Image (cartoon, rainbow, N blue to C red):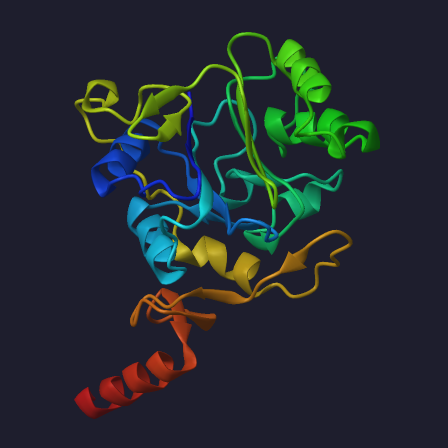
Amino acid sequence: MCIIISKNSGIEMPTEEVLNNCARTNAHGAGFAYALKGHTPTISKGFMTVETLLGDLRARKIGVEHNLIIHFRYATHGPKSPENCHPFPLTPDFKEMQYLRCTCECAIAHNGVFSDMPASDKYSDTMKFIGGVLASPHIIGGIHTKPVKELIKGYCGYGSKLAFLTKSGITLIGTWNIDEGIQYSNYCYTNYGVKTKVTDYSDYSWKDWKNRYNDKSKEQKYLTAQDKYVCHFCKELKDCKYDAEYMGMLCSECSISLASYTSKED
């Protein structure tokens, strides 16, 4: 199913209750894209627990002044992995779409299914749609124009919803629900939309993430990757590395402190 939350600058942030509701019914990872008005959007994604999502939102001090889109995934095509979480940058390069932290000219989140996209055991239908349709030079420059929006809307049909974030603001495709100024792609954010049984939202461990976070070898043609993550100990946005013993991302200060504390106990 998935759900997208869209918030313009000047609107209060969605509550933790809302985010938890979304996570329970869309349990295959989350991500968000944000920007101050007139600034290049930043994507941060691959959160397989709602706690890590909330921690990153706090660490980046995302608030009223930001344009923001948040996506919670319920996978229909492609692996359930951090890399296949939304939002995606608007680029024809599938590897760049899977960056967990990057800046880009346009960030995209999708709610729905593009059933006519070619099947893939590695990439989702949304990634195929972005790479094969939206990344066309004829589309990229006109995302905010009425003719292009109408063309995309016609292709998507009734069921799909799309959110685009650029430095000019947010553009939405499809029918959305508005609640206290925030726009939602469906009703999963309400208690009515929450399943009675809480779905496990953390079937992807930090061990599986470490190579992705620390891989510096990827060439970037369109994007600027970021190396700052939320330290799992001090909860601040810093240069972090994966700590196998602690099983989390730690900044150098916390890594030294924890090592010192452990050695004293021994």
> Residue 91 or 195: which is nearer the viewer?
91
- Quadrant holding the C terminus: bottom left
Front one among 234 and 185 = 185
* Location of residue 165 with respect to 235 vertically, above or below: above
Where in the figure is residue 231, as x and y percent of width and height?
37, 68
Give left or right: position of 10 versus 139: left
Q: Residue furthest front?
A: 10
Note whether 44 is above or below 201 in the view shown: below
The image position of residue 221, as x and y in percent, is: 78, 54
Specify whether 218 is left or right of 108: right
Quarter placement of the N terminus: top left
- Residue 108, image x, y percentages: 58, 35
Q: Nearer the viewer, residue 246 or 86?
A: 86
Q: Residue at x 53, y 61 (%)?
A: 213
Report the side of 132 relative to 210 (left or right).
right
Judge from the rendering whether residue 86 lies leftward or rightward of residue 51; answer left or right. right
State the residue at coordinates (31%, 39%).
201
Q: Quadrant of residue 134?
A: top right
The residue drawn where x is 50% and y is 45% is 33
At x 29%, y 27%, the residue is: 189
Q: Quadrant of residue 265?
A: bottom left
Residue farthest to the bottom?
264
Write down the quadrant of residue 140 in the picture.
top right
The answer to whether 54 is drawn above or below residue 136 in the figure is below
